[in-house]
Image (spheres, rainbow, N blue to C red):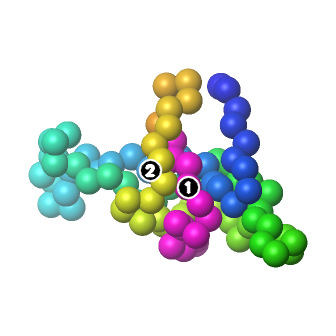
Amino acid sequence: MASIKPLSDRVLVRPDSAEEKTSSGIIIPDSAKEKPQRGTVVAVGDGRVEDGKKFDMSVKEGDKVLYGKYAGTEIEIDGEELMIMRENDILGILS
């Protein structure tokens, strides 16, 4: 797999797969599936610099995160769909 190192305060996230069926067992067709809003952090940048002061990242590789519906940019690396977004697009870390 090709590797990518996010710059500044950007984060590379592997989205979770979309739900295949509802809790009652109804299969959801591809056209009706919603874009996932959670995923796993694959790589993080070094942090942002503001007014000469460095701020470290709050997330780390392996964290399960929740992000906004329209956050980030979808990219494809070696056939794998990933998202790259700014750290402030992440709403929270799931535990």
The magenta region covers 82-95
Left or right for 17, reference 85: left
Left or right for 8, reference 53: left
Determine if the magenta segment contains residue 2: no
Question: Which of marks 1 and 2 precedes in the sequence?
Answer: 2
- Residue 83, image x and y in percent? 51, 47
What amino acid is labelled 1 in the image? Met
Q: Quadrant of the C terminus?
A: bottom right
Q: Nearer the viewer, mark 2 or mark 1?
A: 1
Label 1 crowd (10 A; few <14 / some 14-19 / many >=20): some
Determine if the magenta segment contains residue 91: yes
Residue highlighted by disc 1: 85
Q: Say if 54 sits above or below 71 in the image.
A: below
Left or right for 68, reference 59: left
User: In which quadrant of the rendered view does residue 29 lie?
Assistant: top left
The image's mark for residue 57 is none
Q: Quadrant of the N terminus?
A: top right
Residue highlighted by disc 2: 16
Residue at point 87%, 72% (across, down):
52
- Helix, strand or loop status at disc 2: loop
Residue at point 73%, 42% (across, down):
5
- Residue 16, image x and y in percent? 44, 50
- Residue 26, image x and y in percent? 12, 52
Residue at point 44%, 59% (across, down):
71
What amino acid is labelled 2 in the image? Asp
Residue 40 appearing in the image:
no
Residue at point 69%, 60% (across, down):
9
- Helix, strand or loop status at disc 1: strand
Callout 2 touching callout 1 (CB < 8 Å): no
Q: Main secondary structure of the magenta part?
A: strand
